[in-house]
């Protein structure tokens, strides 16, 4: 292990750098020991229980709001179904962006290295995850929620102009946030067993992806000149700013017979929702702060999102009761 000094507006940050080849070798061996095939490891014929949620109710956007209080149990379950499909639709899109970025990283790298071999291993994992999410969406009878036109068009450029530092930071941001939600989902017996199984598989394999992204991001930060680092860090802050609203889109509320404008504003101003998002973002924003990617202009954008917290930020009290 070596260290690098990253100079930032808030002072110097010491970043520990592990050997890329050793990290990749460990992750490749872990992948060989514990990987899943959703086609074989999931019972897709298992029925969905009409009384069970699709996400823990405390993670839903309208929880602890007047709109939530007026909903019946059946309406709350239906809201959870649509919110999960919205999140999985975003997950498929973001994993496709990740795969394009990883393959661009492979294209620039040494195919004989273990570091690049793991990038290919992760790409294979993400292919299976996207297939898994798509099959589950089909099982619910719903259609995926499409990305908005700007994101769809920008997605065409992914892998073509992705700077490695920005790509791995975006990967880390998306994976840490979804991982937080899925960790509470996979153990909650109020949630559909099939959803809990999908969450367990995704959490197990994403843990390796998060480790890889963190280590690579530290190397990229240490080797990127400060002006370029600050530009990319501001771009990642912009991703964080746009990400939270994309997880549950207004069309979700229309699908469950709510006024989408009223419901969207209600969720956006809900103290519980804001606390839940800060908790979900906490590990990503804490790590980005530690390595010097939230400072100066990017810090101002992150403060505007309201998502800044620390890795030790506790979940809302309602999430800890179950």
Image (cartoon, rainbow, N blue to C red):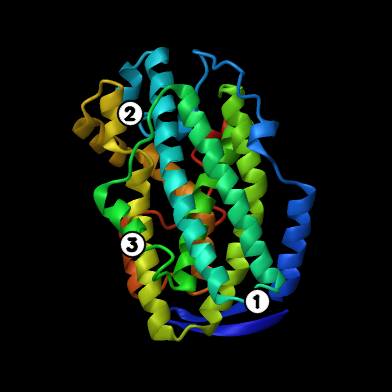
Identify which residue, 269 or 220, lies in the foreground.
Answer: 220
Read off the residue under disc 3: 238
Instruction: Give the CA separation, mark 2 to mark 3.
Output: 28 Å
Residue shown at the point (51%, 37%) measured from the top left: 133
- Name which quarter of the figure residue 40 lies in: top right
In the rendered image, is residue 302 in sight? no
Between tags 2 and 1, which lies in front? 1
Residue shown at the point (62%, 69%) measured from the top left: 215
Q: Which mark is residue 65?
A: 2
Q: Which mark is residue 155?
A: none
Q: Secondary structure at mark 3?
A: helix
Q: N-terminal of the two: label 2 or label 3? A: 2
Is disc 2 in contact with disc 1, using a CB cutoff of under 8 Å? no
Q: Quadrant of the C terminus?
A: top right
Q: Which mark is residue 16?
A: 1
Q: Is residue 297 above or below residue 96?
A: below
Crowding near the residue tagged with mark 3, few <14, some 14–19, many ≥20 C-alpha atoms within 10 Å: some
Identify which residue, 250 or 291, lies in the foreground.
Answer: 250
Residue shown at the point (29%, 56%) measured from the top left: 153
Q: N-terminal of the two: label 2 or label 1? A: 1
Instruction: Give the CA separation, mark 3 to mark 1.
Output: 26 Å
Q: Secondary structure at mark 2?
A: loop
- The picture places residue 176, in percent across and down from the top left corner, at 53, 52
């Amino acid at each position: 292990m070596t260290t690098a000094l990253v100079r930032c507006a808030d002072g110097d940050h010491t970043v520990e750098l592990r050997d890329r080849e050793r990290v990749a070798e460990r992750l490749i061996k872990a992948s060989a020991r514990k990987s899943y095939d959703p086609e074989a490891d999931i019972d897709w014929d298992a029925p969905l229980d009409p009384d069970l949620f699709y996400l823990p109710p405390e993670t839903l956007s309208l929880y602890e709001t007047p709109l939530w209080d007026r909903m019946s149990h059946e309406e709350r379950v239906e809201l959870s179904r649509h919110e999960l499909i919205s999140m999985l639709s975003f997950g498929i899109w973001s994993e496709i962006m990740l795969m394009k970025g990883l393959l661009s990283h492979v294209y620039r790298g040494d195919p004989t290295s273990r570091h690049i071999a793991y990038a290919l291993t992760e790409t294979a994992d993400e292919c299976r995850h996207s297939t898994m999410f798509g099959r589950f969406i089909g099982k619910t009878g719903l259609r995926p929620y499409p990305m908005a036109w700007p994101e769809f068009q920008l997605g065409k450029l992914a892998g073509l102009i992705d700077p490695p530092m920005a790509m791995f930071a975006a990967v880390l941001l998306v994976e840490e946030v979804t991982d937080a939600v899925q960790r509470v989902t996979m153990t909650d017996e109020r949630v559909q067993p099939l959803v809990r199984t999908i969450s367990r598989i995704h959490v197990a394999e994403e843990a390796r992806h998060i480790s890889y992204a963190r280590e690579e991001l530290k190397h990229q930060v240490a080797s990127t000149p400060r002006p370029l680092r600050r530009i990319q860090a501001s771009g990642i802050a912009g991703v964080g700013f746009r990400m939270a609203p994309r997880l549950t889109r207004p069309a979700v509320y229309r699908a469950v017979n709510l006024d989408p404008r009223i419901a969207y504003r209600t969720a956006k101003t809900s103290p519980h929702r804001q606390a839940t998002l800060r908790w979900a973002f906490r590990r990503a924003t804490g790590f980005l702060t530690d390595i010097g990617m939230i400072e100066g202009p990017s810090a101002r954008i992150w403060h505007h999102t309201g998502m800044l917290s620390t890795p030790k930020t506790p979940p809302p009290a309602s999430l800890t009761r179950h």
